[in-house]
Amino acid sequence: MKKMLKIKNLCVSVNNKEILRNVNVEIKRNEIQALLGPNASGKSTLAYTIMGMPNYKITKGKIFFEGKNITRLPPEKRSKLGIALAFQTPPTIKGVKLSKLLEKISMKKINEKEIGIDHQLLERDINVGFSGGEKKLSEIIQIFSLNPKLVILDEIDSGLDIKKVEKLTTLIRDKLLNNVSILLITHRDNILRSFDPDVVNVMLDGEIVCKSKNWRKIWKTIMRYEYEKCRECRLSTC
């Protein structure tokens, strides 16, 4: 399979503080990779850097998307190339209906019945008074409308109960993001089971310390030893 995303020796600073150190990640077409790690380990920083968000300064390294160097491209150009990010905490936008936003950004038509979305949700201001589940659904529908090639899911299960997580992940996997490369950032095993990632990465203190094709083994180790065993692993075969 051809590489969709390649990150090479990436170092990133935020407010003059180094957060990421020599990060290397390669994601193939239609591949699902997971990114695990404790809070404040740099996972979201990596997601925002891939998306090209301001204030995330690349001090070293490069990012390639479908062979194109996108290291210095702004977010809107990365989006047009096919990269999309689902935020952990989606923003509230008063005065803008979800349906109107979708009309502006849509590159792919939404079938409301197939997705099972309530039409009333589309006619509400974006995330204003939305429940946690509605916010996540709104975010995923926006991403689906962009018809992306690579989707970064930054803890989309945050704040949701198990049933809502299962419903959301099934929708993403089966209806919305079929045949799309995914980078999944999470702390929970139920979403890992739903997506069954091809590769799992463990990040500690801004570094990828472990990679494996066996996410179940890695998760079992984390559950037993937390992340201390991963510190010892240091890019072994796990």
Image: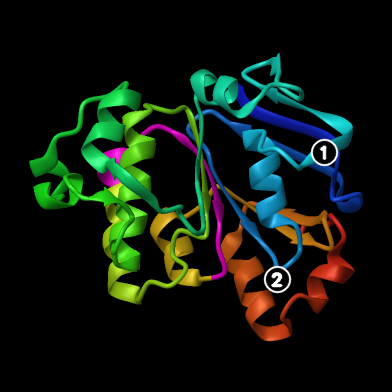
* Residue under the point 62% across and 35% down: 51
Few, some or many residues within 10 Å of mark 1 (<14, 14–19, 20+): some
- Quadrant location of residue 69? top right
Q: Residue at x 12, y 40 (%)?
A: 112
CB atoms of marks 1 and 2 within 8 Å: no
**Amino acid at circle 2:** Pro
Q: Is residue 150 above or below residue 68?
A: below
Which circle marks residue 47 in the picture? none
Whole-percent x, y for residue 70 in the image: 70, 21
Q: Position of residue 196 (x, y in %)?
A: 46, 55
Residue 96 in the image, given as x and y percentages of width and height: 30, 41
Is 148 within the magenta? no
Say left or right for 68 vs 131.
right
| Label at residue 38 | 2
Magenta range: 173-187
How far apart are labels 1 and 2 at the CA level?
A: 22 Å
Above or below, comparing residue 151 to residue 184 in the picture = above
Q: Earlier in the sequence, mark 1 or mark 2?
A: 2
- Quadrant in which the C terminus is drawn: bottom right
Q: Is residue 222 above or below residue 191?
A: below
How is the structure coloured here?
Answer: rainbow
Residue under label 1, please give it.
Answer: 57
Comparing 207 with 138, the one in front is: 138
Q: Quadrant of the N terminus?
A: top right
Outermost residue, front side: 95
**Amino acid tagged 1:** Lys
> Is 163 displayed left or right of 20 in the figure?
left
